Amino acid sequence: MPEGRVEVEPQDGLTTRQRRNRPLVIVHTGDGKGKSTAAFGLAVRGWNQGWPIGVFQFVKSAKWRIGEQTVLETLDEVHRTTGQGGPVEWHKMGSGWSWSRKAGSEEDHAADAAEGWQEIKRRLAAETHRLYVLDEFTYPIAWGWVDVDDVVETLVNRPGQQHVVITGRRADPKLLEIANLVTEMRAVKHPFAEGQKGQRGIEW
Amino acid sequence: MPEGRVEVEPQDGLTTRQRRNRPLVIVHTGDGKGKSTAAFGLAVRGWNQGWPIGVFQFVKSAKWRIGEQTVLETLDEVHRTTGQGGPVEWHKMGSGWSWSRKAGSEEDHAADAAEGWQEIKRRLAAETHRLYVLDEFTYPIAWGWVDVDDVVETLVNRPGQQHVVITGRRADPKLLEIANLVTEMRAVKHPFAEGQKGQRGIEW
């Protein structure tokens, strides 16, 4: 119907809704706390919107279970039993990814990281998730295990409405360049400096 | 039994466990994003430890529902039906607190903020929660609605093992002084600067 038709439209191939809900690349970096916690918080928020969520832990905590994993898996269970929220997948590198079952292979973190990134590329191409948390992904980039130019090209050209949140210190300048939102978490005061050890419920 | 007895103990009246699990005052401040999101992430983590959680929203979003509220109330429901995690209470100032039912009173944000703080003092004295999120609590302090010296004295002398997380810009120096952990969220790049509006799932 001609009514309500906008005469002049931006020639960017996007609907108004798509233009408003622009998919974001978000980076949480800096030496302070809260980078991963805030990223998992965004995952929780996205779950509530009914988004399919994918979390990929590249380094820290990959061998042990953090509270957020239990919580997001509980939310996935809520989704499966009641339809509330969205589905959640949580994968961690540890010794090999959860989708990968290499029997008896030696630990090769560089190969594991590269394999994780290849899987994420496949999922971005297939638009598997609506929000991706690539936790501590800055490190395999910094260590040269994953090619930053490949990451940048993949993110810039990803299809659809997929948000990607990347956490970790020492974020590559090329990554910051293409990010839409960058927050630096800066440690002003930290109890570890007073000899306090990490504690359950606060650190994990 | 004398075996395993430590000969020299710090005379601080604390058990070893208490000394390790020292209750923390945590402040998330700065002009960047993630202050509240990371605080709600700590609440989620605490829930997973079985802690009773209390969230008190002082300003932002107090009249509308953010995703985390739905999620934490869902987790409270999981706790009540399965025993997993801990109980969660979420209160917001909006026009009066949820525990307060003042019919037909005019909006008085200063009085509401002061009333919220009095309730939190009562709960801290009663050790009602294990983790408190005082979201945007820096503002009523900055505006003089809540006395910072009273806050400092209450927090320093609070009994037991209660963690308190306070978020917001312009945190009072007296609050930072007694905080155990302070993180500044610094905005490096923000899509609002590019004319992007807030969007569902990311901002709320």
Image (cartoon, coloured by chain):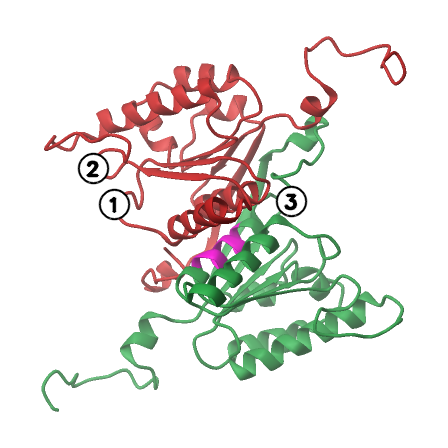
Chain colours: A red, B green
Question: Quarter-wise, where is residue A150 in the image?
Answer: top left
Spatial distance from mark 1 to mark 3, Cα to Cα? 31 Å
Q: Which mark is residue B43?
A: none
Give the main secondary structure of the magenta stretch: helix
Q: Which mark is residue A63?
A: 1
Q: Label 2 amino acid?
A: Ser
Compared with residue B67, is residue A135 higher up or lower down, i.e. above or below? above
Question: Residue A10, position in %: x, y?
Answer: 76, 12
Q: Label 3 amino acid?
A: Trp
What SS does tag 3 mark? loop
User: In the displayed image of the protein, which residue is found farthest to the bottom?
Assistant: B1
Q: Label 1 amino acid?
A: Lys
Q: Name the residue tied to disc 2.
A: A95
In the image, residue B44 lies in the stretch drawn in magenta? yes
| Residue A145 visible at all | no
| Residue A123 visible at all | yes
Q: Are marks 2 and 3 on the same chain?
A: no
Q: Are marks 1 and 3 in contact (CB under 8 Å)?
A: no
Q: Nearer the viewer, residue B203 or A186?
A: B203
Q: Are marks 2 and 1 in contact (CB under 8 Å)?
A: yes
Question: Residue A72, position in %: x, y?
Answer: 44, 47
Q: Nearer the viewer, residue B109 or A87?
A: A87
Q: Residue at x 52, y 63 (%)?
A: B76
Q: Name the residue tied to disc 3.
A: B204
Q: Residue at x 65, y 30 (%)?
A: B191
Q: How many marks?
A: 3
Q: Quadrant of the C terminus of chain A?
A: bottom left
Q: Tell me if mark 3 has few (under 14), some (14-19) or many (20+) residues whose alpha carbon lies within 10 angstroms of its own.
A: some
Q: Chain of mark 2?
A: A
Q: Earlier in the sequence, mark 2 or mark 1?
A: 1
Compared with residue B185, is residue B160 higher up or lower down, i.e. above or below? below
In the image, residue B138 lies in the stretch drawn in magenta? no
